[in-house]
Image (cartoon, helix red, strand yellow):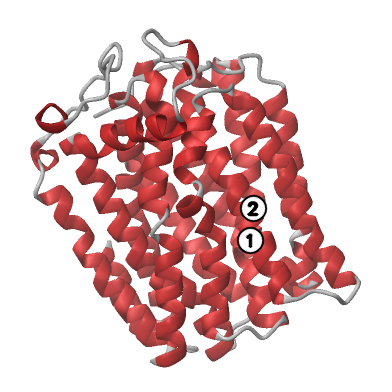
Amino acid sequence: MTPPPTGLFRHADFRRFWAADTVSQAGAAVTLVALPLVAVGTLDATPFEAGLLVAFEYLAFLLIGLPAGAWVDQVRQRPVMIAADVVRAVLLFSVPVASWLDALTLPQLYAVAFGMSVCTAFFDVAHGSYLPHLVADEQLVAANVRIEAGRSTVQVGGPGAGGALVGALTAPVALAVDVLSFGLSALLLGRIRRSGARSTARPGARPGAALRTEIAEGLRFVLGDRLLRAVTLTAAVSNLCGTIGASMLMVLLVGELHLSPFLCGLVFTAEAVGGLVGSLLTGSAVLWLLAVPLFRADGRFALAVLLQALGWVLFMTFKITSVAFRQRLCPKPLLGRMTATVRFLVWGVMPIGALIGGVLGQSLGVRQALWAGALGELLAVLPVLCSPLRRMRELPDAPAEPAPRPLTGAAAG
């Protein structure tokens, strides 16, 4: 499908929304390299401790992902995103401060990672729910393409810059760049005029509905729709197995190959280049599998980086299409709960994958953990291949309104 010419960058509120996201992602690209380097390079974390750090970075999606969606559906989304940006900036700033005071420890890194994951859980649900209120339905694919292209563009230079900053300033100090990015993102979001809609005002809403009832509606919608269920399961399997390897990648690059911070950043830069190409193609696991044996401290490293980038071309094409598919299929009053349910299922498996990666890396070896993750990713394609999505060429439209009562039994099927 080809996104229609929509003039999105003449849409002032979308322009600010896009700029806020892009700035935030630029800082996050630096943190992607700097935070694990703090653990592995500065604090000498073991493979299991490094995997535990990655687990804390995603743990909130498993613990509070579902209630976060039900709550976000009852408030305006923009203030939630602003508050999340501010709190993340404060949490991240504590790392360089503790380093300057010579008091930095792994438990503090775990606490910061978990606190940021809580904020990110609320921010991402609000972000996904807010965009369909900001642009028209026919603009969603184009808007998602522009957002992902902006993210990937800044991430191309971000990890390499992060590696250079770590080399020049040390990893804890480099994190201060992300602190500034979260602050600027909050300022840009504050300038958007439209604050988003409260879904409690939707027709047929039940005042004072129990939180578990709201959560159940989101679960029923995602798991009761055959197409949405297939996309979600594919992403969940991919994230579970992908995180097994990703949690050990920095341990391999720094702890075993002893590569410089800049070369470590180059690996993530290659992923971002692949992501940029994928976002522009909207319109992988095998490649990642081929890259594993080539991560060596010699000329084979360049080919491994290339394969890593090509894998992300395919992944980003799937990601952008699936996000637009979910947003277009879902009635607006259910957007928060739908997004939270998908995040719970798709990102909630990531701390489990990180723990598995840490255990495998500690007991069998870091490279063996990477092999396990890459092999497991081959299974991710099965849910989509076994669904009608394999033959579809157009996205379905959302119903005008959600069903007035929760569906049960055969009706849910």
156 left or right of 96 in image: left
Q: Quadrant of the C terminus?
A: top left
Q: Residue furthest top?
A: 203
Residue at image point 33% right, 61% down: 311
Asked if the residue at tag 2 contacts the one at tag 1, i.e. Cβ–Cβ closer than 8 Å, the answer is: yes
Residue at image point 77% right, 47% down: 180
Above or below for 253 versus 63: below
Return the mark for residue 408.
none
45 left or right of 176 in image: left
Residue at image point 71% right, 44% down: 182
User: Callout 1: 10 Å neighbours few (<14), some, many (20+)?
Assistant: many
Q: Secondary structure at mark 2?
A: helix
- Decide which of 196, 212 is in the foreground and name it: 212
Above or below for 124 versus 115: above
Residue 243 image point, x, y percent: 41, 67
Residue 174: name its quadrant. bottom right
- Decide which of 139, 356 is in the foreground and name it: 356
User: Callout 2: 10 Å neighbours few (<14), some, many (20+)?
Assistant: many
Looking at the image, can residue 188 be seen?
yes
Above or below for 312 versus 50: above
Q: Secondary structure at mark 1?
A: helix
249 left or right of 356 in image: right
Return the mark for residue 116.
2
Number of dots carrying numbers: 2
Looking at the image, can residue 305 be seen?
no
Residue 374 image point, x, y percent: 30, 72
Residue 284: name its quadrant. bottom left
For the residues labelled 1 and 2, the Cα–Cα distance comes to: 5 Å
Return the mark for residue 113.
1
The amino acid at mark 1 is Ala
Residue 67 image point, x, y percent: 48, 39
